[in-house]
C-alpha cells in the first residue's frame, strides 16, 4: 500500500498540497501516479483534502493535526487499516507530483527484499547529483557504505572535499520510504533524536538508535516541491 501524508499547512509554501497543477491539486497528481503501482491512501489533517480526494475517487483518512512528521501520520493511518504484517508500506510525499512510477517500484522491491531483516528499519533511494546541486541545503545528501546502507544524511555538502581538487558525484536522498507494518511501528515508537531536530531530517532517528536504512540508486528527473519557486521550475520542466 502507498500512503501519502498530506498536511494542509506548510511554513514555506502554505496549502501547497492543494496547489493546482494544470487544474489538478498537487496531492491528487501524486496519488494518480501511485495508483498505477498499488492501492493508495491519502492521510491528511484536513477535511478539505478528504473532500477533494473523494471527488477524484481516491481513498483518504483524517489524522491528527499534532504529528511532527509525515511518517507519524502514515503510522496513524496504518493503525486504522487491516494490513498483513509483511505488506510493503510506502510513504510517498504529497509534493512529488512528477515522480516516476519506476522510482516507486524500486522502493517496493527493496522493501520486499529486506522484509525479514530486523536490522533494516527503512528502505529508501537516492539519485546522483553534481557539486553545484549538493551545495543546496534543501537537497538532502546521503553517504552509503559498499552495501548500500546509509551512513549519514545531511543538508550539508557530504562528503566534504578537503584535499581533492576535482568534482565528484553526490547522492541526493529522495524522500520516499518503504516500511513493513512492524518496522513502521518500531520507528514511530522511538523518541525523537537530537540530531533529527538539528537537521530537521526524521530518518536520522533510525540511525541514532542503531538501525539501518537500505538505499537503492534510481534515475529520476523529479524533485520535491518545497517552495513556489520549485513549483514554477517544475511546471517549466514537466508541463
Image (spheres, rainbow, N blue to C red):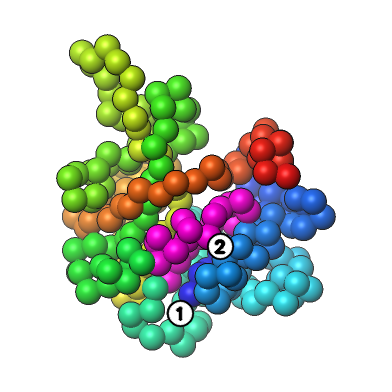
Q: Residue at x 48, y 58 (%)?
A: 102
The image shows residue 127 at horizontal and vertical percentages of 41, 42
Say above or below: 78 vs 102.
Answer: below
Please indicate, yes or no, whether residue 109 appears anywhere in the rendered image: yes
Front disc: 2 or 1: 2
239 horizontally vs 153: left or right: right
Q: Quadrant of residue 71?
A: bottom left
105 horizontally vs 122: left or right: right
> Looking at the image, which is closer to me, 138 or 101?
101
The image shows residue 5 at horizontal and vertical percentages of 56, 62
Q: Residue at x 42, y 33 (%)?
A: 129
Q: Residue at x 60, y 41 (%)?
A: 226
Q: Could you classify mark 2 by the number of other residues whose Cα lies within 10 Å: few (under 14), some (14-19), or many (20 or more)?
A: many
Please tell me the numbered disc located at residue 226. none
Q: List the residue tagged with mark 1.
A: 79
The image shows residue 88 at horizontal and vertical percentages of 39, 73
Please indicate, yes or no, whether residue 135 appears anywhere in the rendered image: no
Q: Residue at x 36, y 67 (%)?
A: 109
- Residue range of the region highlighted in magenta in the rendering: 89-108
Magenta span has 100? yes
Q: List the residue tagged with mark 2.
A: 5
The image shows residue 211 at horizontal and vertical percentages of 22, 58
**Element type at marker 2?**
strand
Say above or below: 117 vs 24.
Answer: below
> What is the number of callouts on the image?
2
Q: Quadrant of residue 75?
A: bottom left
Magenta span has 101? yes
Amino acid at each position: 500500500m502507498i500512503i501519502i501524508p498530506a498536511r494542509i499547512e506548510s511554513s514555506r509554501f502554505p496549502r501547497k498540497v492543494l496547489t493546482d497543477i494544470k487544474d489538478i491539486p498537487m496531492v491528487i497528481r501524486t496519488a494518480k501516479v501511485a495508483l498505477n503501482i498499488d492501492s493508495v491512501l491519502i492521510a491528511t489533517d484536513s477535511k478539505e483534502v478528504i473532500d477533494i480526494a473523494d471527488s477524484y475517487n481516491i481513498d483518504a483518512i483524517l489524522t491528527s493535526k499534532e504529528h511532527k512528521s509525515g511518517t507519524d501520520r502514515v503510522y496513524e493511518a496504518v493503525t486504522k487499516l487491516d494490513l498483513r504484517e509483511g505488506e510493503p508500506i510506502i510513504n510517498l510525499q504529497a509534493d512529488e507530483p512528477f515522480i516516476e512510477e519506476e522510482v516507486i517500484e524500486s522502493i517496493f522491491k527493496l522493501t520486499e527484499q529486506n522484509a525479514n531483516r530486523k536490522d533494516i528499519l527503512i528502505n529508501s533511494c537516492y539519485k546522483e547529483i553534481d557539486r553545484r546541486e549538493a551545495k543546496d541545503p534543501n537537497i538532502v545528501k546521503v553517504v552509503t557504505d559498499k552495501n548500500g546502507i546509509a551512513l549519514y544524511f545531511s543538508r550539508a555538502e557530504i562528503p566534504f572535499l578537503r584535499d581533492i581538487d576535482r568534482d565528484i558525484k553526490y547522492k541526493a536522498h529522495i524522500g520516499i520510504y518503504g516500511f513493513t507494518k512492524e518496522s513502521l511501528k518500531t520507528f514511530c515508537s522511538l523518541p525523537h533524536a537530537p540530531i533529527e531536530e538539528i537537521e530537521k531530517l526524521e530518518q536520522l532517528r533510525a540511525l541514532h538508535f542503531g538501525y539501518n536504512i537500505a538505499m537503492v540508486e534510481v534515475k529520476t528527473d523529479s524533485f520535491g516541491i518545497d517552495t513556489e519557486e520549485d513549483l514554477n521550475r517544475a511546471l517549466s520542466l514537466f508541463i
